[in-house]
Image (spheres, rainbow, N blue to C red):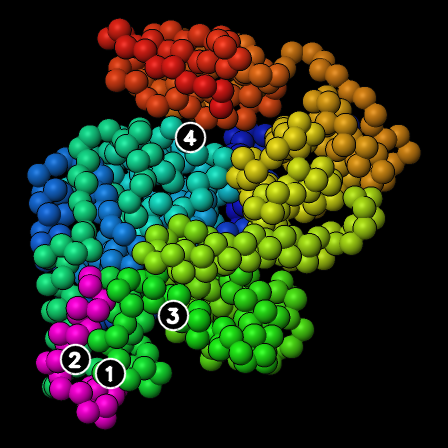
Amino acid sequence: MGAGPRGSGESITYQGVQFGDHNAQYNYFGPVVRTLFIGPVERLQDVCFDPAPLERDLDLARFAGRDWLIERIDGFIAANPRGYVLVQAEAGVGKSTLAAHLVWTRPWLQHFTRLPGGRSGEAARKSLAAQLIARWRLAEQWAPDGIIPPTSGRPEWFSRLLHAAAHERNRSAPGEPIVLVIDGLDEIDDGPEVDSSGPPLGLPGSLPDGVFVIATSRFGIARALHGMRRPIAWLEIEVDGRQNLEDMRRFISAVTHPDSGDERLLRAVRDGGTELEWFRRAVAQSCAGVWIYLQYVLDEIRDGVRGPRSVAELPSDLAGYYAQQIERWRGAPHDEAAQRQWAQAIRPLLGVLAAARAPLTAEQLGLFARVPSTEAVRVFAEETIRPFLYRQDGASGEPRYAIRHQSLRDLMEGRLQAGRPDVAGMARALTAQVHAAHRAITEALTPPGTEDERDWSDAGAYARTHLAAHAAAAGVLDALVCDPGFLLVARPDAVLAQRGGLHTADGRHALAAFELSLHDWTPNARSQNLTRLAANAARLGSDALVAACRRCADGEWPIRWASWGGRQHLKLVGGDDVVDSVVLGLVGPRPVVVSGCFDGTVRIWDAVSGARLGALPALDSAVMSVALGRVADHDLIVAGDEEGGYECGTRP
């Protein structure tokens, strides 16, 4: 049977097939196609993120300025055969608006991490892959019948597709650049399949000719330097830079133009008895180049929440503005009802929103924050903090909510610098609330009882995808990965991505057993997968997982012990370059494999599970030798390159 929209897998074509039933033999000399349907189906249109909501949220119709930055981007593309352009700026300075303007005005491909679900590295690669396939008509080979294969989320598959798209471009439209715009590169969760020593998102270090990546990021993404081969352009938007401030003034003039400006905003300014030129100067001075700050303030004025004359009294920075809003939500210290509402509803709901990994319904918000009143949740989301939320209407019409801008989450997680001690104190209290929210979400999503009593059959999509991340943040991932019921229903990539959240030998061994089992993992085959999981847990010495599997076993012969048999091997997948040297040894109690490559990278793997553990900073030339040793109670990895340089690193 031919491939169809029911499933995805591999199709094998036979010529001249013979088969029989011992009584008769049948000969077919035409093509016979066998299709193996494996796993969930994903269509090209289903994996693409729709950036349409950004047009309204970012007010692209009134985009102004950035000519100086766009000119430098265009100049880089014109002057180089290929390469990366990284636009860096502090939170809230308009990186997303710039990226969206480029996408709206040019035939460039895109991914925005601020869209719901956009922080997943696998989802980002699939979305970009679907756009490449559609733009360069590659569906026949890369997505037959419009079905994108399960491997499409892997970096090596995406790299091959990028080269195929470049080849087709050379044939059908020579000279036209292929440009990928990726907004929020620093916010993407790469997952375990991405080499931590290479570029974020698993992007290829060396792009095909005619291919360019324009990425935005906050400062501090030094990792992007590793693995990216030149040419690279590093562009910065300085908050208080002359060009950024001038761009903001131009935008304010456009949005308040008497003939073509925003009517609601103009009406609010007029009704407030405020002179237009004074308002323009005051709001530009107060927001001082921070664009998300400006958007918040203008929205408040449009909605009548803030008077136009109050812009002269705004806090001096974004953190102070957030603190002012939070103080308003908390209410007066002497107001007992307001303080009770803050402690029992608003603060827990804020913590859940900051901890959430995807937009949540009002029901989910109430469940995770332990707020039983649906009306209280609705008022909170639709009235109290509505300007600070992104609202997404689901297929059923039920709204889902997420924090609108990463900077508010940064404040609540202690990453947004505050200029005043009182703001810093508030941020610390909110950080504690976010940590409590991770614990509360983990408890809410975990069925009651012990491992052999829990019923995971009703686990929803959010739990299957994000529970491991919440458990890691709450410090309880080790216990969760020793629960076979959870491993049987969870998304494997989502669990493996949290490897760094494990703290015990039992947890690490359990995850290694799970990873080994995935080689022959069959969706919805509970008994078969449980047996395989138990066998690998016994082989790797994961006592907790073996015991849990034994209690959950359906058969009469639960596995208690297993050992390696026959010839076994693990393929350690790293970079694409030549391996010049390799060493096997111990780092602490863990057996590891360390390799040195021609491209200067030094990679480290767990010798038992094959899991990639990390890498040393790249050397300047080919690594010719690597060694392991112990000096003064420290495990060391030493690498030497062909130019006589050495790199020394501690245990991974």
Q: Earlier in the sequence, mark 2 or mark 3?
A: 2
Give the residue pinned by disc 4: 195
Q: CA distance from mark 1 to mark 3?
A: 17 Å
Can the viewer see residue 104? no
Q: Earlier in the sequence, mark 4 or mark 1?
A: 4
Residue 418, image quadrant: bottom left
Please tell me whether mark 2 sits on a helix, a strand or a loop. helix
Residue 1, image quadrant: top right
Q: Which mark is residue 279?
A: 2
Q: Residue 146 at x, y = what percent?
A: 44, 52
Q: Residue at x 61, y 65 (%)?
A: 369
Callouts 4 and 3 close, C-beta under 8 Å: no
Give the residue pinned by disc 1: 308
Name of the residue lying farthest toward the right: 556
Callouts 1 and 2 close, C-beta under 8 Å: yes
Q: Residue 566 at x, y = what percent?
A: 69, 12
Q: Is residue 364 left or right of residue 295?
A: right
Residue 85, image quadrant: top left
For residue 117, above or below residue 601: below
Q: CA distance from mark 4 to mark 3?
A: 41 Å
**Amino acid under label 1?**
Pro
Q: CA distance from mark 4 to mark 2?
A: 50 Å
Q: Residues within 10 Å of mark 2 (few under 14, many from 20)?
A: some
Region of the chain picked out in magenta, as a range: 264-289
